[in-house]
Amino acid sequence: MIVRVTQTGGFAGGSEPVATVDTSTVAPASAAKIKDRIGALRRFVASGTQPIGADLYRYEIDVVDERGKVERLVVFHEGEPGVSLPEPLAGLLQAIRGS
């Protein structure tokens, strides 16, 4: 599985890559943790508990499975100082960076 996280939006409206990982190239324990975090992120997105408004950051998480099928998950974030990323996204980024 390949996971790509891109941040877009905000006041400036730019786009930048945040993190990328191919789980076939990391330790099995790291790959399992990333897959678990993707599951948590899917549940978060399905819950519909995201902020609504202008100038929000948009995180696009592309999950490419072994057959090449792409699933895109989208998480919105206010981006204000002191406002943490939603836990499922923060946990995924931590798992990717720690792999």
Image (cartoon, rainbow, N blue to C red):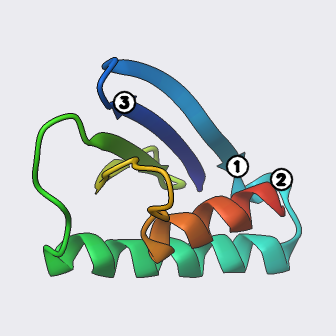
- Amino acid of disc 1: Asp
On screen, 36 above or below 80?
below
Q: Quadrant of residue 15?
A: top left
Reading the chain from its start, which is encountered first: label 2 or label 3? 3
SS state under label 3: strand
- Amino acid of disc 3: Thr
Q: Residue at x 69, y 79 (%)?
A: 33
Q: Residue furthest right?
A: 27
SS state under label 2: helix
Q: Residue furthest front?
A: 81
SS state under label 1: strand
In front: label 3 or label 1: 3
Q: Residue at x 18, y 81 (%)?
A: 47
- Amino acid of disc 2: Thr
- Which residue position holds label 3? 8
Reading the chain from its start, which is encountered first: label 3 or label 1? 3
